[in-house]
Amino acid sequence: MSVRIVIDSASDITKEKADALGLDLMPLKTIFGDEEYLDGVTLSHHEFYEKLIESGIFPTTSQIPPHEFEHKFKEIKEAGDTAVVITLSSLLSGTYQSAHLALDGYEDCIHLVDSKNLCIGEQNLVMYAIRLRDQGCSAEEIVSELEDKKSKICVLSVFDTLEYLKRGGRLSSTAAWAGNLLSIKPVISVEKGEIVILGKARGSKNGNNLLIQQVAAHGGIDFTMPLCLGYTGLDDTMLQKYLKDSASLWNGKVAIEDIPISTVGSTIGTHAGPGAIAVSFFHL
């Protein structure tokens, strides 16, 4: 009997990476008009941003339905395994609820964890689960540790443009126009499972500085735990600028080249658009 870790694609872990890490990936769906894709499986992150930038169609994302979880749970039970299922925040998606609806009859081998996070914050919790699994912890022990530690995860992000928040109906056209005209860069966080705006900065440099300040405001980084940087779009130019600006955060703690970097998929990328950067860590 083995302990399996089931994750959703909102963690921005692709199928290729999930296979390499021994994870069971459940992809959300990304929809462009009449075209439906499996996030990180039939539509890579790079392909998503190409379509987002070039297409006149604003995409939507769809949660994982209960029957897909039920199929996975049945497979795990029949194999005689146990599993820890980690989903994106229940306050941001119905995916956790779908998993809960599918749980009936599988409570003896399936354990659910609402990450209260998403994107690279959820990914950090997954990476911690992998560490515990590889140390030989049982599913119950892993769940206990994740529930204890998940509130310490901090995700901070700077958006480069307000255009995609406007296109998604989350910001008025007037506010987006004024913000882009003034080069406003909002700093976003996940607080208690929900997305909040922590502040706004004029220009990328000020946005990076505000991001650095927020790392300190959240208690600093626990370098013994998983951390990750992320970016949206087709290249990591903005992220490399942030790394240069924030060198004081990492000096003497971790080599910059050793910091995991993840592309951000459609769940957040749909609303962030290209050019956003993010940092996620367990705070002290």
Image (cartoon, rainbow, N blue to C red):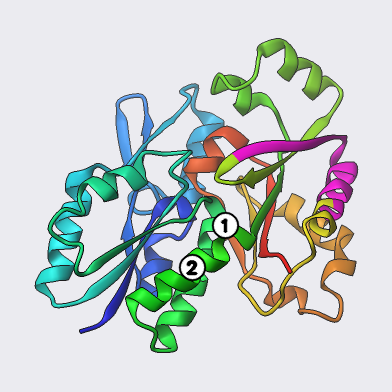
Q: Which residue is rendered at x = 44% and y = 71% of the image? A: 144
The mark that comes first in sequence, 2 or 1, is 1
Residue 68 is at least partly visible in this image: yes
Q: Say whether residue 210 is magenta.
A: yes
Q: Position of residue 38 (x, y in %)?
A: 33, 46
Pair 2/1: label in front: 2
Which label sits on residue 120? 1
Q: Which residue is mark 2?
A: 146
Q: Which residue is rendered at x = 83% and y = 20% of the image? A: 181
Q: Amino acid at mark 1?
A: Ile
Q: Around disc 1, counting alpha carbons within 10 Å, would you say few (fewer than 14), some (14 to 19), or many (20 or more)?
A: many
Q: Which residue is rendered at x = 75% and y = 68% of the image? A: 221
In the image as oriented, which residue stretches furthest toward the top? 174
> Disc 2 and disc 1: Cα gap in Å?
15 Å
Q: Position of residue 245 (x, y in %)?
A: 88, 58
Location of the C terminus by quadrant is bottom right
Asked if 226 appears above or below 52 in the picture, the reply is: below
Magenta stretch in the rendered image: 195-213
- Apparent side of residue 98 relative to residue 267 in the rendered image (left or right): left
Q: Nearer the viewer, residue 228 or 14?
A: 228
Q: Position of residue 92 (x, y in %)?
A: 48, 38
Q: Secondary structure at mark 2?
A: helix
Verify CB contact (< 8 Å) between mark 2 and mark 1. no
Q: Secondary structure at mark 1?
A: helix
Residue 218 image-quadrant placement: bottom right
